[in-house]
Structures are given as structure tokens and as C-alpha cells.
């Protein structure tokens, strides 16, 4: 709900105020024949005013909510005017006696919105499916009118945990048709700056995708604004926001922009639409499907593929047991990977998953559009929601995230290893060569020996830079990236699984893989035994 109004609304709001200023429906004595203006109010108008006043009051109280200490049986407390309220009656009494003017102004604002919505809807033809309230939001309101009121909070409250990681990071997306993404961009920029949030927000005509960090108070206010915004409230719910420990410190800056896609798959939304995705499975339903898949006695004959549609460096440090994890560097390579391996998915039931669910929306739509799969399912809410419900389930290792934290830990499993010595290790660092932005897994022991680059090329660059600081201009290149195929083709090899459960080892050419830095002949990589097939990479024909 707006916390202020734009200048061009002044006259209309003044009329609203003149009409409703002294009407309080809780006081029945006010409604009497001696008051002509009140007597003229019809039942419908009184109901509108009552609704507006209650809504204004409730929203004002909601902005004062704080989580109660764990020791308390109540879920929330309230803080207002530097006072703490532990029960609803006391905060209601305080707001009614100390903030009547604010409630008055907000009630007038709500009435204005209702009036505009009502008058606009009457002029629309029945065949016109446009939402008048949405049009009013984007065309008749200044961006500042849709920012939450934070005047009752001190700067310290809004910035609490801002820089020490004690705040919160929000991950969410919403696919819905947006007519004016540029207005949404301006609004989101103002909203995040208003709440001191950092992070990344992508906006397109197909929806919005955001990851923002800040104090817990700031992220809570952000969620409330998003859920109350007419553009998103019919599509978003509170459960669509994934939260994790962090804060504004997890992102170097705030970046908000308008793009062709809210997640870059490289195909126009007009060709592959989010409106035709796979079947959504809740974490519980997905867990049962994976359990059924892993329990099959003869997995070579299975009609199911558990498909990780993330990038290789994500699945490297954490993945579902038995999954097929494509060796791709970007999600925009995923369509090419599907095209290259179309025979692999023929007549298969595909269970897809990604970090938060957004890549599966159009990734599953693309796979479905090929018309070769028996069925395509996707994990609703992604790995993030699954791990909230099943931290010790079938997902092993860490969950990669695209911010300064690199990964979230929900269990103690380590499924990856140091690129140099092969010791169990899953904590990424950036390659030590400034021009390279690749991630490298190097354990403390190897770091101590100076092995901090992702490959030989970068290691040599780093050495030359250290020897000759003046020669700092190098072409950006990386052996790891140069040797990696854009869309590797998988070859199904039957009969290579052990008869009983247990870890198995697959030899991987260290020079070909991202472990190329060590140039040691071969590196053993532990792969879950439940995997139903062995996959090897072939050069394109």
C-alpha cells in the first residue's frame, strides 16, 4: 500500500477527506438525521469506508511486527515509537490513540484506490481482460507512492546485520505477464535502495527474478510489499520466497535491469513460454519419486532420468544421488545439450531440478516441446525448498548460490574434491589470476603451496604477473573453459554398475576436466552408486 501520494492526486484526495473525515462507523451515535452529509451516505459507501479504515489500520500494525524470542509462545511482538508490545490489544490501543492521523491519511489513500478501481472497471468492456488496478499502479502513481513507510524504524533497525552476515537473503521469482517492465525496474530500484537491500533483480515482460540481501526487517518489508503489489499478489505467496542466512554483504552492489528473459536460456519467451512447463512436484512428492527411482533393482532398464539442469560447477559440489548432471557452463547451453542428446530422453520420465525452480520452468517447457519424453516433472521450489524439508534426504553436498557465499550447507556430506590433491573439499574460491573469473576447489594444504589458480594457463599468468608486475595486461582466457564443450554428447554404456550399493570410482582425465591445473595423469572422483547409467563425453561428429 502506498505510504504517500503523488502531487497530482491532491484535489481528489482532498474530496475524499472532506467526505469521510468525521465518519467513524464504530461510533453509532455519529449516524443520525441531524448530520445531513452522513445521512446521505449510502450503505455501500459506508462499507467501503469501513473496509478502507480496517485495511489501513491492519497494514499499519503489520509494519510494526517483530519475531518474538524463541522462548515465547507467541510468534510475534510489535515495536512502535521505541516501545515494545507483546500482545495485540496493547499495540492496537497504541496505534489507535497515537497514530490516528497516519491511519486517517492511509484510509483516504485506500479509498482513492478503490474509487479509481471502481470507476475504471465500469468503463472497460467485458471482453477487455486488462486489470485496471494494475494500469493505475504503473501509469497513475509515482514510484515513491509504492514504497513502504519506514519512518517508525531507526536506521540501526533497518541496517541490523547489514554487513556481518546476520541478516537475510531472499531468493524468488514470479512468471507473469508485465506490460511495463521499465516502470517495474524503476520501482524495484527505488524499493531496494529505500530498504538498503543489495543484490540482483531481473525484469522482463515474462516476469521478475530476484535475489536480494539485507537486514531481516528489510527483507520482511520487501516481501510484504511484493505480496501486496497488484501486479504480483495473484501469483506470489509467502512460500515462494526462499530465505537463507546472509545479508547485504553477500552482494557487492544492487543491480536491477530489464532483460529479454528473467533467466537467460537464450531463446525468446515467445518461442518457449513459461506457460507450458512440466508437472510441478512438491518436495515431498519429488522425494518419493527419487526414492522409487533409486530403489529399482535394475536401473539400466529404468524409464526415469533424474536431470540436474544447473551448471557443472554447481552440481560438482552438491547433487541428487543417481542424477545426470550435464557438463555445461551456462544455462543458455541447456537447449543445445538437450538437442545433442535427444535420443537419451526418448520415452523417458524426466525428473528435473535446479536451485530455486526458475530454470526448470522454461527448461522443462523446452524439453516438453521436443515431444520425445513420456513425462516431464520439475521440483517446485527447487533444491532450496527440498533441503528445507529433507536436509538429510537424497541431495548430498552443498547448494551452490550466485553470491559472495558461493554455497549453502544443509548437511555434512562432501561430494567434491580438491582440484590438486584429490582430498575431500567443497569450498570454492575465485582463481587467483585477476583476469580469470573461474571458480576453483583447492584445499588449505594446496593453497599453502601456492596452488590457487584454476588451470596451468592461469597459474603461469599469475607467476608472470608476480615476477613482472608492470606486465598486467593479459588476454582473458582459461584452459578450463577453452577445453569444455558447449554441449557434450552423452553415450549410454550398459552394465557398468556394481551389484550392491556403495561408492564407486570413475576415472576422469584430469587434463580434460576442470582439474586440469594439476596435469596429474588421472584423478579418482567418487560418484554415488545409485546412479543408473555411466555417462562419458564424446566429441561432436
Image (tube, rainbow, N blue to C red):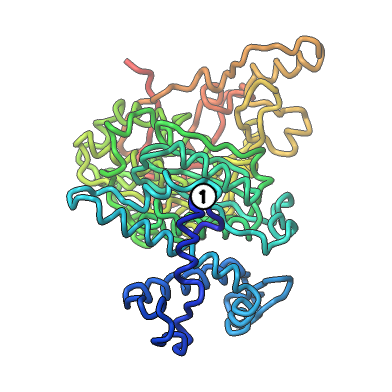
- Measured from the top left, where is residue 465 in percent x and y? 77, 15
Nearer to us in this view, 333 or 67: 67
| Residue linked to disc 1 | 171
Whether residue 498 is visible, yes or no, is no
In the displayed structure, would residue 15 be above or below residue 213? below
Residue 43 as seen in the image, left or right of residue 370: right
- Left of 410 or right of it: where is 357? left
Q: Residues within 10 Å of mark 1 (few under 14, many from 20)?
A: many
- Viewer-nearest residue: 158 or 182: 182
Q: Residue shown at 46%/70% (left/top)?
A: 55
Question: Is 524 in front, or is 397?
Answer: 397
**Considering the numbered disc 1 on the image, is that residue within a helix, a strand or a loop?**
strand
Please, which residue is most extreme toward the bottom here? 29
How many numbered marks have been drawn onto this rendered protein structure?
A: 1
Q: Residue at x 17, y 49 (%)?
A: 127
Write the residue at 60% across / 70% down: 101
- Specify whether residue 502 is in view: yes
Image quarter in which the C terminus is found: top left
Q: Position of residue 260 (x, y in %)?
A: 40, 31
Rendered location of residue 228, percent (x, y):
45, 59
Location of residue 294 with respect to 259 vertically, above or below:
below
Q: Tell me residue 393's x, y (percent).
A: 46, 59
- Residue at 69 percent across and 62 percent down: it is 153
Amino acid at each position: 500500500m502506498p505510504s504517500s501520494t503523488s502531487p497530482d492526486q491532491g484535489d481528489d484526495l482532498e474530496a475524499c477527506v472532506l467526505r469521510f473525515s468525521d465518519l467513524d462507523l464504530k461510533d453509532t451515535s455519529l449516524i443520525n438525521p441531524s448530520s445531513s452529509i452522513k445521512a446521505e451516505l449510502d450503505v455501500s459507501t459506508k462499507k467501503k469506508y469501513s473496509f478502507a479504515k480496517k485495511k489501513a489500520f491492519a497494514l499499519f500494525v503489520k509494519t510494526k511486527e517483530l519475531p518474538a524470542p524463541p522462548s515465547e509462545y507467541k510468534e510475534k511482538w510489535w515495536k512502535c515509537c521505541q516501545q515494545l508490545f507483546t500482545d495485540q490489544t496493547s499495540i492496537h490501543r497504541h496505534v489507535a490513540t497515537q497514530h490516528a492521523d497516519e491511519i486517517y491519511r492511509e484510509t483516504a489513500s485506500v479509498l482513492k484506490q478503490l474509487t479509481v478501481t471502481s470507476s475504471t472497471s465500469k468503463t472497460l468492456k467485458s471482453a477487455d481482460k486488462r486489470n485496471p488496478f494494475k494500469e493505475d499502479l504503473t501509469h497513475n502513481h509515482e514510484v515513491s507512492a509504492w514504497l513502504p513507510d519506514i519512518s517508525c524504524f531507526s536506521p540501526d533497525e533497518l541496517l541490523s546485520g547489514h554487513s556481518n552476515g546476520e541478516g537475510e537473503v531472499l531468493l524468488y521469482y514470479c512468471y507473469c505477464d508485465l506490460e511495463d517492465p521499465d516502470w517495474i525496474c524503476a520501482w524495484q530500484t527505488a524499493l531496494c535502495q529505500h530498504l538498503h537491500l543489495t543484490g540482483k533483480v531481473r525484469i522482463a515482460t515474462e516476469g521478475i527474478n530476484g535475489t536480494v540481501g539485507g537486514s531481516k526487517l528489510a527483507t520482511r518489508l520487501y516481501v510484504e510489499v511484493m505480496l501486496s503489489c497488484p501486479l504480483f499478489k495473484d501469483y506470489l505467496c509467502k512460500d515462494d520466497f526462499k530465505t537463507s542466512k546472509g545479508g547485504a554483504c553477500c552482494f557487492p552492489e544492487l543491480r536491477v535491469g530489464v532483460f529479454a528473459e528473467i533467466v537467460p536460456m537464450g531463446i525468446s519467451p515467445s518461442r518457449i513460454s513459461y506457460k507450458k512447463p512440466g508437472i510441478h512436484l512438491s518436495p515431498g512428492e519429488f522425494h518419493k519419486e527419487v526414492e522409487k527411482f533409486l530403489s529399482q533393482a535394475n536401473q539400466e532398464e529404468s524409464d526415469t532420468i533424474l536431470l540436474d539442469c544447473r551448471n557443472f560447477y554447481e552440481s560438482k559440489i552438491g547433487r541428487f544421488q543417481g542424477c545426470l548432471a550435464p557438463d555445461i557452463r551456462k544455462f543458455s547451453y541447456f537447449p543445445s545439450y538437450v538437442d545433442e542428446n535427444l535420443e537419451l530422453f526418448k520415452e523417458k520420465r524426466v525428473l528435473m531440478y535446479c536451485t530455486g525452480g526458475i530454470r526448470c520452468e522454461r527448461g522443462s517447457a523446452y524439453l516438453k516441446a521436443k515431444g520425445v519424453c513420456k513425462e516431464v516433472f520439475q521440483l517446485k521450489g527447487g533444491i532450496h525448498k527440498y533441503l528445507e524439508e529433507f536436509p538429510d534426504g537424497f541431495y548430498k553436498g552443498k547448494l551452490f548460490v550466485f553470491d559472495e557465499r558461493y554455497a549453502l550447507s544443509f548437511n555434512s556430506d562432501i561430494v567434491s574434491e580438491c582440484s590438486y590433491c584429490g582430498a575431500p573439499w567443497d569450498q570454492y574460491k575465485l582463481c587467483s589470476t585477476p583476469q580469470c573469473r573461474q571458480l576453483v576447489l583447492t584445499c588449505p594444504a594446496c593453497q599453502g603451496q601456492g596452488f590457487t589458480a584454476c588451470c596451468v594457463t592461469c597459474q603461469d599468468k599469475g607467476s608472470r604477473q608476480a615476477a613482472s608486475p608492470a606486465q598486467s595486461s593479459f588476454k582473458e582466457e582459461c584452459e578450463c573453459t577453452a577445453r569444455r564443450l558447449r554441449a557434450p554428447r552423452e553415450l549410454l554404456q550398459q552394465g557398468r554398475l556394481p551389484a550392491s550399493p556403495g561408492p564407486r570410482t570413475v576415472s576422469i582425465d584430469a587434463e580434460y576436466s576442470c582439474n586440469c591445473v594439476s596435469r596429474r595423469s588421472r584423478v579418482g572422483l567418487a560418484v554415488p552408486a545409485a546412479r543408473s547409467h555411466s555417462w562419458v563425453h564424446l566429441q561432436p561428429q
